[in-house]
Image (tube, rainbow, N blue to C red):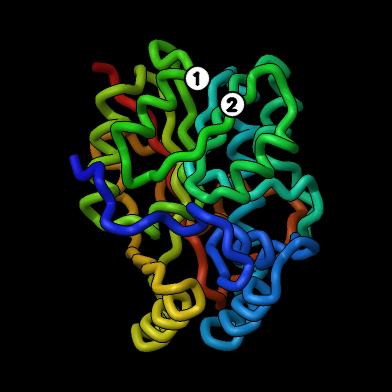
Amino acid sequence: MTDTPLTPPPGASFNPAEAVPARTYAALRGADKEAFAPDREAVDKLKRTIHDKVDEVAQENAAALVRVVRHLAERGYKQFADLGCGKPVQGMDALGLPDLYDAAAGIEPDVKWLALDSDQVVVTTCRALLRGPGVSVVQQDLRQSAKVLDAMSAHLWLGKPVVVILGAVLHFLTDEQCTDLRFALRARLAPRSVVVVTHVTGDGMDPEAVERGRAAYAELHGGVPIYVRSERQVLDLVRDFAIKDPGVVRTIDFLPEEGGRTPLRDAPHFLMVMAERKDR
């Protein structure tokens, strides 16, 4: 496994003068009360460079994750690992969404929840705001797959099913790093464990526009790369797991709520897939 990244992960140390992915994503969701000027500037430029509805796309991604967490909690899952969890927003985003822990705890009060992220501000905020006897917060880099699984083992019982949430994070990892993490999860998770992935895609978009968006994102975030993957490539991220209905679809089409917002069909989007750990 490749467990020694060459550079520190985004947000590993606090720097208000530079946009970082976690704060930019929170600002895109509309939770920009605590955003710094570089974060707001990044949002403005991404909307100009990629699409003027890119903020709504991020909001739809967050809403889909809330839906799937509730769905799985209703089906009896009591252990969750939110890897690359991002900054809690406490319902202060554009859609008034609960944080994922609160979505699960509202259905299963005894839920055990691991929030893991490499961003120092995210971790500090999680420790302050995610309240509950079953909550654990860890600062760790997803590129360090062995250490990620060690953290999961220390705070969850891996002999029982775990829901692993990888929401809008794998597109920051190379193919090799994604494979390392997939192998580690496959080796350590119990049967019936579930992996949920959302991932930015360029499917249906002009390749030149996709490249402009990638370049703009890296420039705005101190060189942080973003890997835009196709439906087939996203499916490969959960290879060796059993794909659950509805397969790989846009987040707006994953467990859609009746009477929800009108889907953004002409905007860039995230893909979503849910897969179950097969029997050993």
Tag 1 secondary structure: helix
Q: Which residue type carries mark 1?
A: His
Q: Nearer the viewer, residue 75 or 88?
A: 88
Residue at left offset 38%, top offset 55%: 8
Residue at left offset 51%, top offset 78%: 220
Q: Nearer the viewer, residue 128 or 94?
A: 128
Residue under numbered circle 2: 136
Residue 7: image x %, image y %? 32, 58
Q: Nearer the viewer, residue 121 or 242?
A: 121
Position of residue 242 in the picture relative to residue 183 (left or right): right
Q: Is residue 185 above or below residue 230?
A: above
Query: Residue 155 has which mark?
Result: 1
| Residue 110 visible, this angle | yes
The earlier-in-sequence mark between 2 and 1 is: 2
Is disc 2 surrounded by few (<14), some (14 to 19) or many (20+) residues within 10 Å?
Answer: many
Is disc 1 surrounded by few (<14), some (14 to 19) or many (20+) residues within 10 Å?
Answer: some
